[in-house]
Image: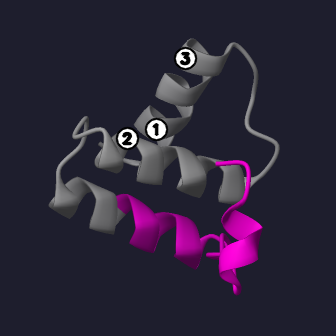
Amino acid sequence: MNATELKNKFIATKNYEPADLNELLDFARQLYLRSEITISEYRDITRELELAGACKPAEKNEYVGL
């Protein structure tokens, strides 16, 4: 799975476009935690999204609401 496929899955699941790359990164994390994607897919997607400008939360409090 790549970022484009992830975005399509996001839209199909949530019925709206992701607001930004960070929302896609969070969605990829959720898929990995639910064992819907492998660790290698998660790493590849994370790398691709981070190169495009996504970033992980700097503090654990930013994870509230996930």
Q: Is residue 50 left or right of residue 15?
A: left
- What residue appears at the point 56 percent right and 74 percent down from the top-left corner? 50
Q: Quadrant of residue 10?
A: top right
Render colour scheme:
one colour
Q: Earlier in the sequence, mark 2 or mark 3?
A: 3
Q: Looking at the picture, does residue 20 appear above or below residue 37?
A: below
Q: Earlier in the sequence, mark 1 or mark 3?
A: 1
User: Residue 52: image x %, image y %?
Assistant: 62, 70
Reading the image, the residue beneath label 3 is 13
- For residue 6, the mark is 1
Q: Amino acid at mark 3?
A: Thr
Reading the image, the residue beneath label 2 is 31
Q: Give the magenta part as a residue range.
A: 45-66
Tell me the crowding category of disc 1: few under 14, some 14 to 19, or many 20 or more residues within 10 angstroms, Cα based.
Answer: some
Residue depth check, mark 1 versus mark 3: number of the one nearer the observer: 3
Residue depth check, mark 2 versus mark 1: number of the one nearer the observer: 2
Q: Amino acid at mark 1?
A: Leu
Q: Looking at the picture, does residue 48 appear above or below residue 25?
A: below
User: Residue 56: image x %, image y %?
Assistant: 61, 75
